[in-house]
Image (cartoon, rainbow, N blue to C red):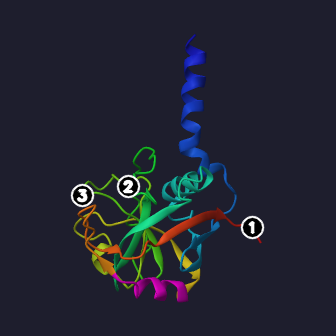
Amino acid sequence: MRVWLVLITLLCALPLQAGKFMQPDNLYPRVQLETSEGNIILELDRSRAPITVNNFLSYVKANAYNNTVFHRLIADFVVQGGGYNMQFKEIEQGKTIFNEAGNGLKNQYGSIAMARLAEPHSASSQFYINLADNDSLDPGSRWGYAVFGRVISGFEVLDKINALETETSEKLGWPDVPRQPLLLKTVRLLPTE
């Protein structure tokens, strides 16, 4: 009976850990974000942020980021997504992960990092892309935000996104919401070269 309980527990945890089985020998997997403004290709850094990359890839494998929105855009700062579908309903989220800030990667223009609450180890599905160098988000005397990759193609798309108009959503009561929905249509793992 105990063996079955252990097996069931392991099987239930597999979807949360699915990312570690995606190109497991590739330290720098690449993913393509197809947005309503164009495509962005990211190179993830498993050598510096293995927990974060595997977590992100688990959401990619589950197609959880497909047909979602970037719900927060602050020009010359960040664009944030990975949390809400097109109706602004929260996507299903897995467990929170350990904050890998301090891994040597910086919140520089074009880097991707995990969004979180005030508690340092509260990141789950939401991420952001830096639209400027944001040293204030790096660790120092307090926990920072874990960078886990960088844009390698699609900088012109970042520029288009940075120029989009935002508003305070009357329906949601949130500031910095893109006036026209900024869609994340698909996120897919690219084959190794």
83 vs 157: above or below: above
Give the Cα distance between marks 3 and 1: 36 Å
Residue 158 falls within the magenta-colored stretch = yes
| Mark 3 closeness class: few <14, some 14–19, many ≥20 residues within 10 Å | few
**Where residue 57 appears, x then y in whole percent?**
58, 56
- In this rendering, would 3 be left or right of 122? right
Query: Which part of the image, by quadrant, shows the N terminus?
Result: top right
Q: Residue at x 53, y 43 (%)?
A: 16
Kindly give the residue lying farthest to the top in the view shown: 1
**Where residue 91 appears, x then y in whole percent?**
45, 50
Task: Return the disc, 3 or 2, that comes first in the chain's sequence.
Answer: 3
**Where residue 79 appears, x then y in whole percent?**
40, 74
Q: Residue at x 29, y 74 (%)?
A: 176
153 vs 10: above or below: below
Q: Which residue is mark 1?
A: 192
- In this rendering, would 26 be left or right of 131? right
**Where residue 24 appears, x then y in whole percent?**
67, 54
The residue type indicated by label 3 comes to Ala
Q: For numbered disc 3, what is the local secondary structure? A: loop
Q: Which residues are the magenta region?
A: 156-165
Which sits in the foreground, 155 or 112? 155
| Mark 2 closeness class: few <14, some 14–19, many ≥20 residues within 10 Å | many
Query: Which part of the image, by quadrant, shows the C terminus?
Result: bottom right
- In this rendering, would 124 be left or right of 156? left
Q: For numbered disc 2, what is the local secondary structure? A: loop
The residue type indicated by label 2 comes to Ala
Kindly give the residue lying farthest to the front in the view shown: 171
Q: Which residue is mark 3?
A: 118
Q: Which residue is mark 2?
A: 123
Task: Return the disc, 1 or 2, that comes first in the chain's sequence.
Answer: 2
Verify CB contact (< 8 Å) between mark 3 and mark 1.
Answer: no
| Mark 1 closeness class: few <14, some 14–19, many ≥20 residues within 10 Å | few
